[in-house]
Amino acid sequence: RPFGYAIVGLGKYAINQILPAFGECQHARLAGLVSGDPQKARKVASAYGVPEKNIYSYDNFDDIRNNPEIDAVYIILPNALHADFAVRAFRAGKHVMCEKPMATSVGDCQRMIDAARRASKQLMIGYRCHFDPITQRAIQTIRAGKLGKLRAVTTENTDVLSIDDPSGQWRVKRSLSGGGSLMDLGIYGVNGARYLLNEEPIEVSAIRAESTNPVFHEVEDIISWTFRYRSGALAHGNSSFTAAATSRFGIQAEKLSGMLNPATGYYNNRFETVAGEETHILSDPMFQIPALNQFSAQLDHLPDVLGSGKPSLATGEEGMQDIRLIQAIYQSAATRRPVSTDWGDWRRKA
Ligand code: NAD
């Protein structure tokens, strides 16, 4: 039978992106719901054919241990709640898919990784871009050497936060979000720099803008960072909660420059390479992908990894490395000094 997920948290991303994506899954199905709002849970359950007995609250969530229809839980809650729910899910003997950012501290990331190991269960982070065909195509093109040696990557991830919306309100509360635009949007640039350059930075410098807007009293609005690499390359990122939506990765390389724009959108991402006056668009309309494709591919990846034993593209270690780098960015911005991130041999395996 298909692999059963229980979705924890029925907010915007769960309702609008993840639940509809089950329709296109090959190996995964929606098996359960965990919500603090029983009325909403019943409504969603009836829309998706989830039986009433597979609806849980945050309080009786641990009872999923007795439900063999649920193989994994997918945590789509505010960031600071990810770690505790992941640990509870592992204790209940389930695999875990957890939204980005993995957690709000490196200690919590380690706690999740340790709990997975103790339970002998898989922990995967919801890095959907790794399953986006355009991103995969860009990575393959770079790894095949078509652009030549990469010299620098620039990343921009911005969006105007809607503070009137509940999903905007927890994002500006440090205790729930762990940080501002960097935790929410800039993380795509941090992760993207790592998968494009296929190298870990050895030093981080960062600067944070002062905001006079009381909304950004607890967390940052605009923050910029630079990663320095042993190979001589640099990566740069900028994120903001008060600039209109951008999601762009520029790739400066010895033979060809490249651009992913949008780089991390839900659909219709685009990759082009530029040599002199010639532009090659590797994502012309022929290759436009169905809107939900990357979400379904991400949901299918966990059962695929479990069944085939092939390496996961989005491990807990992968998620923790981004949180370690994000913490180094915050440290550099606070101290106004570069921070060493030369943490030995840890390297992402592409
Ligand atoms: P949201 O506010 O719409 O949903 C959060 C859900 O958690 C709501 O149903 C809310 O009721 C519930 N919740 C439980 N306890 C809560 C508490 N103490 N405070 C506030 N809400 C509580 O937010 P969202 O945009 O759906 O984001 C949820 C998670 O998904 C975040 O970790 C976010 O980073 C991630 N996300 C990922 C992507 C992506 O593209 N991968 C996109 C959007 C959001």
Image (tube, helix red, strand yellow):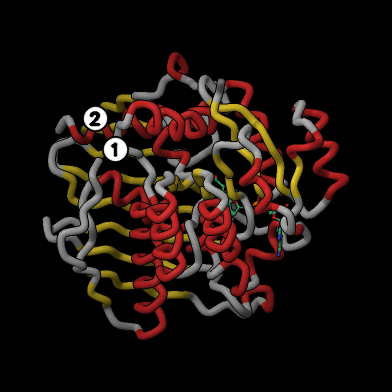
Query: Would you place residue 60 above or below residue 295 in this image?
Result: below
Q: Quadrant of ligand 1?
A: bottom right
Residue 308 on image: x %, y %: 34, 26
What is the three-letter code of the residue carrying label 1?
Answer: Gly
The residue drawn where x is 48% and y is 34% is 298
Query: Where 212 sits versus 235, above or below?
Result: below
Looking at the image, the residue that sits furthest to the front is: 66
Residue pointed to by mark 2? 141
- Above or below residue 143? Residue 58 is below
Q: Are marks 1 and 2 in contact (CB under 8 Å)?
A: yes
The residue type indicated by label 2 comes to Thr
Q: Position of residue 94 (x, y in %)?
A: 53, 44
Query: Where residue 249 sits: x, y (%)?
Result: 37, 46
Residue visible at 34% across and 54% down in the picture: 317
Residue 197's disc number: none
Residue designated by label 1: 258
Element type where label 1 sits in the image: strand
Q: CA distance from mark 1 to mark 2?
A: 10 Å
The residue sitting at 45% across, 59% down in the picture is 112
Q: Residue at x 78, y 37 (%)?
A: 53
